[in-house]
Amino acid sequence: MTHLLSLKELNKASLQSIIRSAIEIKKNPQHYYDACERQGLLMLFQKTSTRTNLSFQSGMNQLGGYAVTLDWDASNFSISPIQYEARYASRNCDVIMARLKNHSDLLELAKYSQVPVINGCCDKYHPCQALADLMTIYEVAGTFSGVTITYVGIHNNVANSLIAGCVTLGINLLLVTPIINRPSWDEELMQTASRSGFVEHVSSLAEASSRSDFVYTDTWVDMEFVQESRYEEEKNRRIEQMLPFQLNRKNLSGYSPYIMHDMPIHPGYEIEEELIESEKSIIYQQAENRMHVQKALLLHVLNKS
């Protein structure tokens, strides 16, 4: 049984295969209308979602299957040990996509599930987003060879899965990450990244942009904390420390790499509004590709690729 919990599970051949499959599905969706006929996807949400919800639900429906959405807090997952609910829930579907707050809960779910589990985002990894990112880069560049990406922002779950993907595929990744989101830190991953020679820490966006084909940013505040009053002090601290690293034309120092953002966007914070709609922005292509690569991922974990 194949789970996808971090992106570290995939070797180079499997990762390339999913990306190429996603591009083929995007070009010829009609060839896959019955690929998952009558198969069910359970979507389990503990965190809010736009892209994960819409892309998985649309993707499974377009593959001929169906999706059932379950709110963690409105279900018995919130009041009973995960092992018991997982054993039951997995008898009612063919695959589970879970968007949970804690990676430890995701591991518990996968341990007791009788069907494949896909991580739709947790505090440590966001592999589905990284797959869409890598697909988009391949579409634009036509290759992974010689490509350099800069990730500027908080070192978080998105950064982790992007690091894992770049190390596996041999993509150069520059990290401009002044703040580490401690729950996201993966020491084993970072040691692997350091040994790989593909990942480098850079002190400024201006320095990194001169070497980059793509520059990618993400929110500075975890989405579940954006509107929480108890998080206000940490939010303000992050804004103050990160504003000098905003993705804007001044910090790009005259260079014009492709602009990426995984959304939701907070204009005026991690990115200036002008760049969101600029000619080098591939943000909406990146977001659209969530659905196409989700389809390829579903086929992969269901052994239909």
Image (cartoon, rainbow, N blue to C red):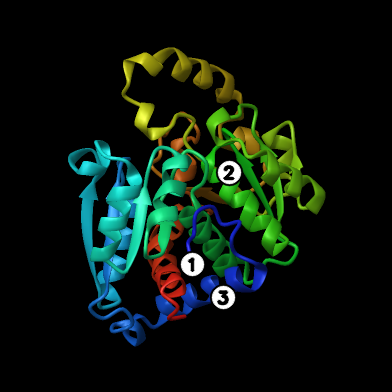
Residue 244 in view = yes
Q: Residues within 10 Å of mark 2 (few under 14, many from 20)?
A: many
Q: Which residue is mark 3?
A: 17
In the image, farthest residue toward the top: 233
**Residue 279 as seen in the image, left or right of residue 185:** left
Callout 3 secondary element? helix
- The quadrant holding residue 186 is top right
Q: Which label belongs to residue 159?
A: 2
**Residue 54 as seen in the image, left or right of residue 142:** left
| Image coords of residue 222 (percent x, y) | 43, 32
Q: Is residue 300 above or below residue 72?
A: below
| Image coords of residue 128 (percent x, y) | 46, 56
Q: Which label belongs to residue 205?
A: none
Which is more toward the observer, 305 or 49?
Answer: 305
- The quadrant holding residue 276 is top left
Q: Is residue 4 above or below residue 277?
A: below
Residue at image x 72%, y 41%? 208
